[in-house]
Amino acid sequence: MNDDIQPQPSIRPDVPASEDEEVIALANSMLDAARRGDGDGLLPLIDRGAPANLRDASGNSALMLAAYHGHAELVRELAARGADVDLLNDRRQSPLAGAAFKGYTDVAVALLEAGADPGLGSPDALETARFFERGEIITLIEEHAARRED
């Protein structure tokens, strides 16, 4: 999950390559901030119009990276700013499945509270939690499903 955005030939001939490089550097710094849980470095950029669903070369969104690295509060803040809690990466993994894989119960709670669908992805979050024997996360997902049925 360390794939950065890779430079591509400029598709805008009127924009100097140096500006493209600056945009790529900014995007990579945003994704790095998500990995580190650095909301102070990331959230103001999103508040000023940077895309909340910015993705790296592997399709991992900033929210996915924050979730995968255990940053529950940043996950909440990104979701509150419109980041898609169900955005799958290129391997069809969801942020909730990533949290289940890593065993981050607090991140799983944040994602479920933000409306994450535990049935998305391959494997989905419940399958992942069962495979890695994440009892607390299994319980959270099952309780979430039961509340939705009511």
Image (cartoon, rainbow, N blue to C red):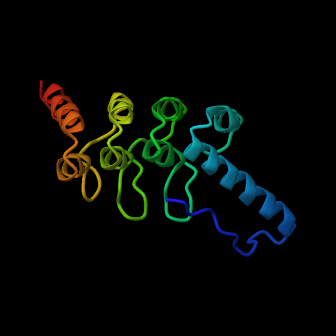
Please, which residue is most extreme toward the bottom here? 9
User: What residue is rendered at 83% in x and 72% in y?
Assistant: 13
Q: Is residue 1 above or below residue 103?
A: below
Q: Nearer the viewer, residue 137 or 86?
A: 137
Q: Nearer the viewer, residue 37 or 85?
A: 37
Q: Quadrant of residue 123?
A: bottom left
Q: Position of residue 139 (x, y in %)?
A: 17, 33
Q: Position of residue 114 (x, y in %)?
A: 38, 31
Image quadrant occupied by the C terminus = top left
User: What residue is rendered at 37% in x and 31% in y?
Assistant: 106
Q: Nearer the viewer, residue 64 or 101?
A: 101
Q: Is residue 69 above or below residue 80?
A: below
Q: Is residue 91 visible?
A: yes
Q: Position of residue 27 (x, y in %)?
A: 68, 53
Task: Give the side of residue 58 with respect to residue 144, left or right.
Answer: right
Q: Quadrant of residue 28?
A: bottom right
Task: Give the side of residue 86 with respect to residue 39, left or right.
Answer: left
Q: Is residue 97 above or below residue 44?
A: below
User: What residue is rendered at 63% in x and 63% in y?
Assistant: 5
Task: Give the side of residue 4 with respect to residue 25, left or right.
Answer: left
Q: Position of residue 34 (x, y in %)?
A: 57, 44
User: How many discs mark residues in the rendered view?
Assistant: 0
Q: Is residue 125 above or below residue 80?
A: below
Q: Is residue 52 visible?
A: no
Task: Give the side of residue 128 with respect to residue 77, left or right.
Answer: left
